């Protein structure tokens, strides 16, 4: 397609409950939605950057700026733009992977809709539904945590992930393991809250039979994770550190992780996410799909990605109502612990206009 322009829409969705991690406490989700308009097609993309640079260096206002000044202009002049051409065209601009991912996603959605092809088919999905886990925030007390976990298990989630940080780790994990038993699929996510000096402390999680400990150390501390992986039994999984297929290959080869959390927004898009899946599969490394509190747009694409063969662990592809009372698309509803893979062309979903309007903060048209 020939790109006419991109509409950048800031939305703000209240969360059903505060979501606290080692790096922030959120009561609402600010996100950017992109609508790529072409001569004969249009498509939707979602930028997963937070309002402030606390998960990674990107943040929503910076994404809007880099899209406006550099990324959208870089796609003009392409008579027959397709998704494969987006990353090479944006490569001269360093970083800004979440902004690039959103733009590629919108072009990919437009291209696939015009070809009447579901994203799952394009990516190589082998399942028509995916098993779902849930990410549980840091709570005010252990009883409050146990109630939240109990509710999520009643909802049917197949795996529990607990956010941890120094001072909220051993005790909540012990309490959940003791209350819900050894068969519960249980893992933790530190969001880089620890240092290599905490190795002996983190080894105290070993008796609880966790599936993994996610991103215990700083995203740049690959060698620290290599050392840590040698001194704890719990498998190390990386999230923030895995920014590309190259980074995944290096981390795996060095022994920094034995499981990878794949997030398309973090790595520059769904095509790079598939490449990371393929690199991990070649190394025999299981992967799962991480979450960034996406709306139904990103959720639809993540579920399609999570249906690839190497995604052998339940992901953070939770139902819409884990985060939002009202989603901007038709809600994703958990059924027997699974979400269905969208079967329509492209993302297979689109915003519900009334919901979109309700949560829109601003819109901007960037001509190509
Ligand atoms: C589901 C989950 O735990 N996601 C991230 C952390 C996270 C937490 C809170 C967020 C709030 C706004 C935007 C992105 C966010 C990402 C993670 O796996 O590390
Ligand atoms: Mg994480």
Image: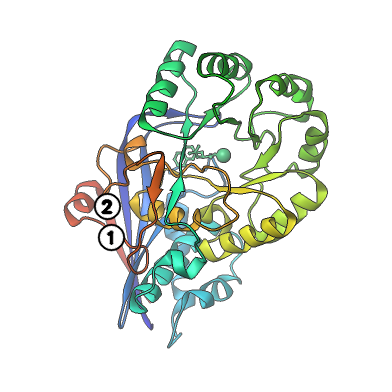
- 29 sits left or right of 133 in the view: left
Look at the numbered disc 1 and give the secondary structure of its residue. loop
Q: Residue at x 64, y 62 (%)?
A: 278
Q: Which residue is mark 2?
A: 329
The residue sitting at the left extreme is 354
The residue sitting at the bottom extreme is 79
Marked residue nearer the N-terminal end (2 or 1): 2
Q: Ligand 1 within 8 A of label 2's CB?
A: no
- 228 in relation to 201, above or below: below
Q: Residue at x 28, y 58 (%)?
A: 363
Q: Which residue is mark 1?
A: 350
- 91 sits left or right of 154 in the view: right
Confirm or deny contact between disc 2 and disc 1 (CB under 8 A): yes
Q: Which residue occupies the foreground of this view, 346 or 240?
A: 346
Residue 305 location in percent, x, y? 49, 57
Query: Quarter of the image holding residue 208?
Result: top right
- Distance Cα–Cα, label 2 vs label 1: 6 Å
Q: Ligand 1 within 8 A of label 1's CB?
A: no
Q: Residue at x 41, y 44 (%)?
A: 338
Q: Which residue occupies the foreground of this view, 122 or 239?
A: 122
Quarter of the picture holding the N terminus: bottom left
- 364 in relation to 22, above or below: below
- 205 sits left or right of 7 in the view: right
Q: Residue at x 39, y 68 (%)?
A: 118
Residue 43, labelled with which disc?
none
Quarter of the picture holding the C terminus: bottom left
């Amino acid at each position: 397609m020939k790109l006419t322009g991109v509409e950048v829409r800031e939305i703000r969705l209240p969360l059903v409950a505060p979501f606290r991690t080692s790096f922030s406490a959120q009561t609402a989700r600010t996100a950017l939605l992109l609508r790529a308009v072409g001569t004969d097609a249009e498509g939707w993309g979602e930028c997963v950057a937070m309002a402030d640079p606390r998960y990674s260096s990107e943040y929503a206002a910076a994404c809007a700026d880099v899209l406006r000044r550099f990324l959208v202009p870089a796609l003009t002049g392409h008579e027959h733009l397709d998704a494969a051409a987006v990353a090479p065209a944006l490569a001269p601009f360093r970083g800004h992977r979440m902004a690039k991912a959103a733009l590629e996603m919108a072009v990919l959605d437009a291209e696939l809709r015009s070809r009447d092809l579901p994203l799952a088919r394009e990516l190589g999905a082998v399942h028509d539904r995916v098993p779902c886990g849930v990410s549980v925030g840091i709570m005010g007390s252990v009883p409050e945590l146990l109630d939240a976990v109990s509710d999520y298990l009643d909802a049917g989630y197949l795996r529990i992930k607990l956010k941890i940080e120094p001072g909220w780790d051993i005790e909540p994990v012990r309490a959940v393991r003791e209350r819900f038993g050894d068969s519960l699929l249980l893992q933790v996510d530190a969001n880089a809250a620890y240092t290599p000096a905490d190795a002996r402390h983190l080894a105290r999680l070993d008796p609880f039979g966790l599936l993994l400990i996610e991103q215990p150390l700083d995203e740049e501390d690959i060698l620290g994770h290599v050392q840590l992986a040698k001194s704890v039994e719990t498998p190390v999984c990386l999230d923030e550190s895995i920014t590309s297929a190259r980074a995944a290959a290096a981390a795996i080869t060095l022994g920094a992780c034995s499981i990878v959390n794949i997030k398309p927004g973090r790595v520059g898009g769904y095509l790079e996410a598939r490449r990371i899946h393929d690199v991990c599969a070649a190394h025999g490394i299981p992967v799962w799909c991480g979450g960034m509190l996406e709306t139904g747009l990103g959720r639809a694409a993540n579920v399609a990605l999570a249906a690839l063969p190497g995604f052998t662990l339940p992901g953070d592809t939770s139902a819409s109502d884990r985060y939002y009372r009202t989603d901007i698309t038709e809600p994703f509803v958990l059924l027997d612990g699974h979400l269905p893979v969208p079967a329509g062309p492209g993302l297979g979903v689109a915003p519900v206009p009334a919901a979109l309007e309700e949560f829109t903060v601003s819109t901007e048209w960037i001509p190509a």
